[in-house]
Amino acid sequence: MKCHGVIALVRQHAVRKAGDVLTATKWTGAKISAKDHYIRNGEKILHWNQRRPVGLPIESAFARARVNVPEGQAPDGSPHERSVGSGHGSAGITTKPERGSGGPRKYVGWIVLAAYSLFLVYRALCHGEGDDIANVPVWELQESRRLLGWIGGLVLTGFCEFAYFVPFGFIATMVLPRGSRWLRRFPISLPALLAGGALAALVRVVEVGHSWHLAVAAGLAIPLLGCLFGTWIGTTWLRGWRARLWFVPKIALLAFLATLCTGIILWLSVEETPLPFEAARVTSAEKRRLVRLIRSKSPRSLEEGQTHTLRLTEHDIDVLLSWGLSLGSPDRKAKVSLAHDSASLSMSIGVPLAGGKPRYLNLVVAGGSEIEEGILNLNVDRCRIGSVKVPRWILNSCSPVVASLLSHDRRSKPFLEAIRGITIEPDSIEVTYGRLHLPPGFREDLFGPASASEEVLASTRAQVDHLLAVVSQSPHTRPSFGACFETVFTFARDRSAERDPVTENRAAIFALGMLLGHPRVEEFLGPVLADLDNRTARRVLRRVTLRARSDWTKHFCVSAAIALLSDEVVSDAAGLLKEELDADVGGSGFSFADLLADRAGTMFAIRATRDEAAARAMQDRLAHGFRVEEFFPPAADLPEGIPDAELRSRYGGVGGQGYRRLTKEIERRIATCTAYR
């Protein structure tokens, strides 16, 4: 009896030191240290003030206490409480169930978790891979501002993917049990993290379908980081108020360090001066030479099983890079250096800064590549961005991911599959390729859905059918340029009552580009004229004149169509290239009048499709009659038929002083047209 009395006194003393309430639902043999809190599922249930050996089970502290009533039931039979004590009627401990472990709250948590999981899957079904911001038309990246905006959009998309999985990690931590004793030692809930990884994989499968590859697997890193962050928040929340209060300073510190590191890297990535090299000079002669070289090796001329081998020198590649970069911002340059089975690319891009001197994003990357059966293999040896040298382990990790992304991208995959081999030698590179097969939807990927979508194609077919039907009523009478424009834009205004006027105006311009300009416009847009038998009306439309010149009609309409397929800069560059080719021996010569026609067509396309209000205004203007001086200024007095030698000697070539004087005069005349104001 004395022994029992001593045990009872010890038990009472322990209960008083432990506190008033013990929060737990399931009794385990967990251990308590001499001075720490006992944690179960992130909650404090006991504070031990008495010194005793570390690791002593709770059962020993309470003299192997036994539960007097069934689990989850109080002595009076009410649920959610139970009493713990000895079998001798001594001190008892009233316990409450662990939060989230039972009752209605548990089921509510599971319902919320399932609902949010379904939301993420539904979002993946709605968006899919095709809505990725990475799938933008190539022309959108011509200017430095657009390029930087595209990079910023990719960063924002990645942050959104991260943020979408943070709530899932938090909810899963609240609902899922943390598992055995050794799992509770981690600062996060591993079961919740595993559930988040499974959901992220499911979402990616829904987005990409069966096209699972290394780049897709690497894309799981961002949602997994979001889930990891959410589980950390949930675990911290369950630890009590002290942990919650410390959580805010921790987040603030992490945000400050992340912002500081990002700012330092960005500042070191841009420099005050560009890389010290001279970009290749692009002349009209160089353009003509490269155009002839590429045309002679066109993959369009190949039959199945045939191949071409195109050899480009280091100078040729430098000229192509300078030519392509010149279509956008002027403060960009690039050059390559070729060696045996390796190449080095140096590039400087001007970064516009508000109210300050522009800085430059300088990039130097070197390595080798090979293509086997359409699969690209990259081996990047060196990469430097500004003054930041990328570590080799990062290059080794990212190179396979980038190669996998390019190998499975819809826009690059057809070209990689056509390539049979690449040989890189000092000062030259040889590419052997077969027939090129463009998959369905490639035009939309290249030019964007606004230019080559099914909606635009359907409206263009309707415009072509309507214009041919009107012309067929008088097959022996050649319609005027203005009558054709009045016809298509009046029809566009009628269709805009229930449709987008910008789309209808695009379709009208595309129809004019094919019928009045050149049938090859259809190759960039999609099949429109293939099933049409009205050849008589089409021949009549090819003879339509603008200010008594049929060639100006073609220049105007084709430039307008190109401006919609790409942008203003590319359309002007295409018109200029046409004149530079004409200036060659045997050509019709360089014509500033044709440049005015090209520029007028480009301005017309821009004004007619700028926004909904501008589109409707252009429809109303043309529906009430076409006046040529409002759209096309006088051009007969501008120099024409200029051979290349005279263009260089008299006007300083393309970009010379005389050339710039006449282009300014062209811009002044177009500015007088009331339709473009």
Image (cartoon, helix red, strand yellow):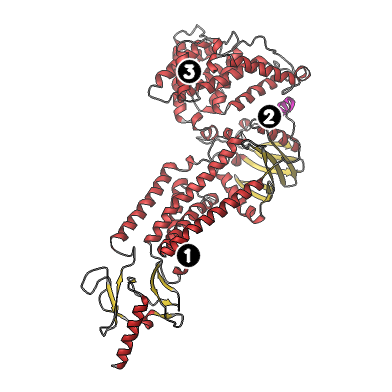
- The residue that disc 1 covers is 187
Q: Amino acid at mark 1?
A: Pro
- The residue that disc 3 covers is 618
Considering the whole magenta stretch, tell me its main secondary structure: helix
Q: Which residues are magenta?
A: 283-297
358 relative to 557 in the view: left or right = right
Mark 1 surroundings: few (<14), some (14-19) or many (≥20) residues within 10 A: few
Kindly report the distance in space between the C-alpha atoms of the residues bearing marks 3 and 1.
64 Å
Kindly report the distance in space between the C-alpha atoms of the residues bearing marks 1 and 2.
65 Å
The residue drawn where x is 70% and y is 18% is: 661
- Select label 3 or label 1 by which is in front: 1
Mark 2 surroundings: few (<14), some (14-19) or many (≥20) residues within 10 A: few
Image quadrant in which the N terminus is located: bottom left
Kindly report the distance in space between the C-alpha atoms of the residues bearing marks 3 and 2.
42 Å
Circle 1/circle 2 CB separation < 8 Å: no
- The residue that disc 2 covers is 296
Q: Secondary structure at mark 3?
A: helix
